[in-house]
Image: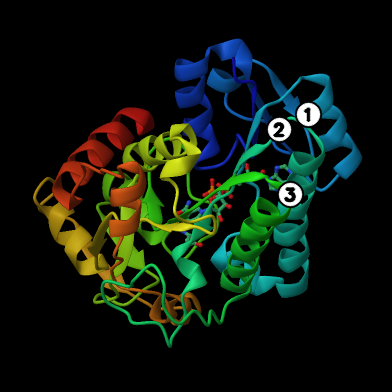
């Protein structure tokens, strides 16, 4: 039986992935940790402990004491926040990864999931239908740390047999936990503001197309990748995951189908330059062929769920 450690269980992804993994592996086998207190559905359904992934000794001790076999490491500073504190964010993002790689090397926690991002691509990358392998010259702190992280993950697989697995998530859209300081956060905020105020001031231009995915699809993809046999994996860096591609104007139009009076204005800030350096759409055929990536939501089906669930939550 797997014994799973989640690092970063209180964040946008962790708050949903923890509960999904508990359904699959049993509540008592999924150990949730973070430096921040999570929602009560996590603390009440299984083990939770405050744990700082930057504290190597505490991490090693936790993994050994609880006989952990798999780790999902979700701790990171996202793209928008990382630009405000470049050196600090580099230190956190890299140390959070290197500590889990080292612990995986030295213990039975050999299978490690660590998410990369579409931010590994840069302005010299082909923007549309971005291939798995192409020019990668990221020009953001976050993107540089993700590309370095992918290289380290593959290195630990080749040199030490660490079962490193990763996807380059697109922007993730969810209603449970608010997004954590990224460039794609507008596509979460817009739904909250549509319900609260029927209007939204967007920090990206109306025609900024970016790859995006609904959280349910992202969680399913993550668990699928972690369960597939090693022989199916042709890559040990990180798999492209495309989801859908849309602009702020297209989300606004999708929302107007349900809230006709909804209005949007555009005031691009520093995050526009980040968005401009990223792909507009992604070719994820390698993930589809290797391990059966198969997402089901499009902008309309996602919008319907987002509006319904946020309205319920804010009531
Ligand atoms: P988030 O900011 O919402 O959550 C990160 C969590 O990590 C937070 O709860 C935070 O408290 C925790 N954390 C931070 N420092 C920590 C530390 N030192 N020790 C333990 N926990 C710590 O981020 P998220 O959106 O859930 O993203 C999770 C991962 O997925 C990150 O690696 C991120 O780069 C990646 N990713 C996210 C997206 C997205 O759209 N959400 C897209 C691509 C990649
Ligand atoms: N959603 C993330 C961000 O905008 C992409 O990795 O930072």
Please give the residue where the numbered disc 1 appears in the rendered image.
63
Please give the residue where the numbered disc 3 appears in the rendered image.
160
Which numbered circle lies on residue 193?
none
Dot 3 falls on a residue whose secondary structure is helix
What is the spatial separation of the Cα atoms under label 3 and label 2, in whole angstroms? 13 Å
Please give the residue where the numbered disc 2 appears in the rendered image.
109
What is the spatial separation of the Cα atoms under label 1 and label 2, in whole angstroms? 7 Å
Q: Earlier in the sequence, mark 1 or mark 2?
A: 1
The answer to whether residue 111 is above or below residue 126 is: above
Image coordinates for residue 171, horizontal then vertical, percent: 40, 57
Instruction: State left or right for residue 97 relative to residue 151.
Output: right
Image coordinates for residue 131, horizontal then vertical, percent: 34, 71
Mark 3 crowd level (few <14, some 14–19, many ≥20, 10 Å Cα): some
Instruction: State left or right for residue 275 relative to residue 160.
Output: left
Q: Is residue 40 visible?
A: yes
* The C terminus: image quadrant: top left
Dot 2 falls on a residue whose secondary structure is loop
Instruction: State left or right for residue 187 relative to residue 38.
Output: left
- Tell me, yes or no, whether the two marked residues, 3 and 1, touch with CB atoms within 8 Å: no
The answer to whether residue 151 is above or below residue 166 is: below
In the depicted view, which residue is nearer to us: 38 or 112?
A: 112
Mark 3 or 1: in front is 3
Mark 1 crowd level (few <14, some 14–19, many ≥20, 10 Å Cα): many
Q: Residue at x 65, y 48 (%)?
A: 75
Q: Earlier in the sequence, mark 3 or mark 1?
A: 1
In the depicted view, which residue is nearer to us: 266 or 68?
A: 68
Q: Residue at x 53, y 58 (%)?
A: 116
Q: Is residue 76 visible?
A: no
- Tell me, yes or no, whether the two marked residues, 1 and 2, touch with CB atoms within 8 Å: yes
Image coordinates for residue 128, horizontal then vertical, percent: 26, 76
């Amino acid at each position: 039986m797997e014994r799973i450690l989640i690092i970063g269980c209180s964040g946008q992804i962790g708050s949903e992935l923890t509960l999904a993994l508990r359904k699959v592996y049993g509540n008592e086998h999924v150990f949730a940790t973070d430096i921040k207190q999570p929602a009560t559905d996590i603390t009440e359904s299984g083990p939770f402990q405050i744990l700082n992934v930057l504290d190597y000794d505490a991490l090693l001790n936790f993994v050994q004491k609880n006989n952990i076999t798999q780790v999902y490491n979700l701790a990171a500073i996202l793209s928008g926040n990382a630009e405000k504190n470049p050196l600090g964010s580099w230190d956190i993002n890299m140390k959070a990864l290197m500590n889990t790689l080292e612990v995986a090397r030295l213990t039975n926690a050999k299978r490690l999931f660590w998410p990369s991002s579409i931010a590994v691509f840069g302005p010299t990358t082909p923007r549309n239908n971005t291939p798995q392998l192409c020019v990668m010259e990221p020009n953001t702190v976050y993107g540089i740390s993700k590309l370095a992280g992918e290289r380290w993950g593959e290195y630990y697989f080749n040199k030490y047999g660490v079962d490193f697995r990763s996807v380059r998530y697109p922007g993730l859209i969810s209603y449970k936990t608010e997004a954590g300081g990224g460039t794609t956060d507008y596509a979460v905020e817009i739904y909250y503001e549509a319900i609260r105020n029927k209007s939204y001031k967007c920090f990206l231009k109306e025609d900024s197309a970016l790859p995006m995915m609904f959280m349910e699809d992202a969680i399913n993809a993550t668990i699928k990748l972690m369960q597939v046999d090693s022989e199916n994996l042709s890559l040990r860096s990180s798999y492209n995951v495309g989801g859908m591609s849309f602009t702020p104007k297209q989300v606004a139009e999708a929302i107007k189908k349900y809230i006709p009076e909804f209005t949007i204005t555009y005031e691009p800030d520093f995050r526009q330059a980040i968005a401009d350096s990223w792909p507009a759409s992604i070719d994820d055929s390698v993930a589809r062929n290797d391990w059966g990536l198969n997402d089901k939501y499009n902008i309309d089906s996602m919008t319907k769920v987002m509006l319904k669930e946020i309205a319920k939550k804010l009531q």
